[in-house]
Structure formats: C-alpha cells, structure tokens
Amino acid sequence: MHTTKLTKVGNSTGITIPRDVLTEARLDRGDEVTLSVRDGRIEIAKSSDDYSKAMEAGRAFSTRYRRAMAVLAK
C-alpha cells in the first residue's frame, strides 16, 4: 500500500502515482485511462481495456436492476 497527497494542478487536482504501482497496474505515462467511483473509491483503468468495458457494463446493469437483483438474491 502506498500513501500520496492530492496536489493542485491549475483548477484541477492531481495525484502522483509511484512507478512501481504503475508497473503493477500495467500503466505507463501517456496511457488513456478511465476513472470511476464505486463505494467511495476511485478506480483507474486503461480506457481501451476490454476488462474495464465489461466491468462498466456490469456496474451499469447492477445499478439499473438493483432492486430486481436484491429480490432474486433472497
């Protein structure tokens, strides 16, 4: 686990990600990423990654059919 600080970058906020974390996540400078928020956590993934697309579709489904899935889970 790594700890870092959020920093001001113009009118936005930036974060410095350690090199070993980028390597482990198979990310590199210049990669296009998608950001999503789930349960108060920010998730970062390569935007062209098929896994990211599938996860986003799954999240959209679970959000849309939340009540139906809760009933079926009983």
Image (cartoon, grey):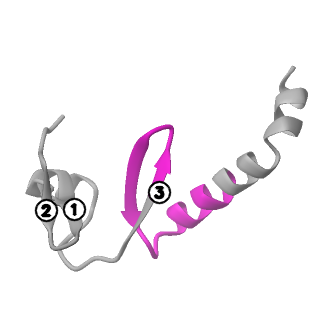
Please tell me whether mark 1 sits on a helix, a strand or a loop.
strand
In magenta stretch: residue 54: yes
Q: Amino acid type of disc 3?
A: Ser
Whole-percent x, y for residue 12 in the image: 24, 68
Disc 2: which residue: 8
Residue neighbourhood size for the residue with mark 2, other residues' Cα within 10 Å, grouped as few (<14), some (14–19), many (≥20): few
Which mark is in front, 2 or 3?
Answer: 2
Q: Which quarter shows the N terminus?
A: top left
The residue shown at (19%, 62%) is: 14
How packed mark 3 is, by other alpha carbons closer than 10 Å (few <14, some 14-19, many 20 or more), is few
- Asked whether the residues under the numbered discs 2 and 1 touch, taking CB atoms below 8 Å apart as contact, a structural biologist would say yes
Residue 52 at x, y percent in the picture: 51, 62
Q: Is residue 68 shown left or right of residue 44?
A: right
The quadrant of the picture occupied by the C terminus is top right
For disc 1, the neighbor class at 10 Å (few under 14, some 14 to 19, many from 20) is few
Q: Amino acid at mark 1?
A: Thr
Magenta region: which residues?
36-58
Residue at position x 13%, y 38% in the image:
3
Gap between marks 2 and 1 measured at Cα: 5 Å
- Residue 29 vs 2, above or below: the answer is below
Residue on which disc 3 sits: 36
Residue located beneath label 1 in the image: 13
Q: How many numbered discs sit on the rendered protein?
A: 3
Secondary structure beneath disc 2? strand
| Horizontal side of residue 48 vs 18, given as left or right | right
Q: Is residue 38 magenta?
A: yes
Q: Residue at x 12, y 52 (%)?
A: 20
